[in-house]
Image (cartoon, helix red, strand yellow):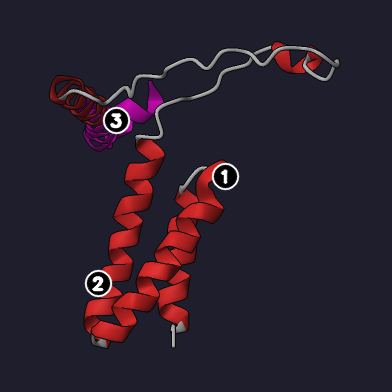
Amino acid sequence: MMTRLHLAILWTGSRFVRGSDRAEWLAEWQTELWYAMREGDGESVTSFCLGSLRDALWNRRNSGVCRRYGSVLMIADRPGFPDPPAIECADPLESPFRCLALLGLLALIAMGAICLLLKHRYRQASCSSDYCRSV
């Protein structure tokens, strides 16, 4: 018998899968879960279900096509209107260099924010005399 925890993990994973593939993905994993429950103990079945989250994320990332329609959606309701072509979307963090560049940019932004905060605090601490307050 499938427990609620295992089904909840699969349901959570199905939310990551694109809507058009969701029902098939969930059915496949529920079938696999049924076989895993027949052969394994509770701990290994839970690990198996957690693997579905990784598969769902992989499926989402590698589904291959992002559709961008733009203003075509406004006139697409007309009969006989052709479907717009699918446009391949590259993942912005696909290469290690891009990932490191993004992390470096985030680190620079964080360091800049810290410097501004420290400068503001230092200014407040150094101007505690009556002379700074009157100016």
Lower position in the chain sequence, tag 2 or tag 3: 2
Could one spot residue 44 in this view of the protein? yes
Q: Quadrant of residue 95?
A: top left
Question: Which mark lies nearer to you, 1 or 3?
Answer: 1
Check residue 6 for magenta coloring: no
Give the residue at mark 3. Answer: 120
Marks 1 and 2, the one that precedes in the sequence: 1
Q: Tell me which residue sits at (39%, 26%) in the image.
A: 134
Report x, y in % for residue 101.
18, 21
Q: Which residues are magenta?
A: 111-135
Please name the amino acid that badge 3 sits on.
Answer: His
Which is in the foreground here, disc 2 or disc 3? 2
Callout 1 amino acid? Gly
What is the magenta segment's predominant secondary structure?
Answer: helix
- Point out which mark residue 19 bears: 1
Q: Nearer the viewer, residue 116 or 95?
A: 95
Residue 54 to residue 115: above or below? below
Residue at the spot x=52%, y=17% of the render? Answer: 86
Residue under the image location 81 percent in, 13 percent down: 80
* Horizontal arrangement in the rendering, residue 68 relative to residue 121 (left or right): right
Secondary structure beneath dot 1 equals helix
Q: Nearer the viewer, residue 96 or 19?
A: 19
Number of the label disc, if any, that sits on residue 47: 2
Q: Nearer the viewer, residue 23 or 8?
A: 23
- Residue 54, above or below 100: below
Marks 1/3: CA–CA distance: 49 Å
Q: Position of residue 126 (x, y in %)?
A: 21, 32
Query: Is there any visible trace of residue 12 in the rendered image?
Result: no
**Residue drawn 33% across and 82% down?**
37
Could you tell me which quadrant the N terminus lies in?
bottom left
- Of the pair 22 and 115, the residue shown nearer to us: 22
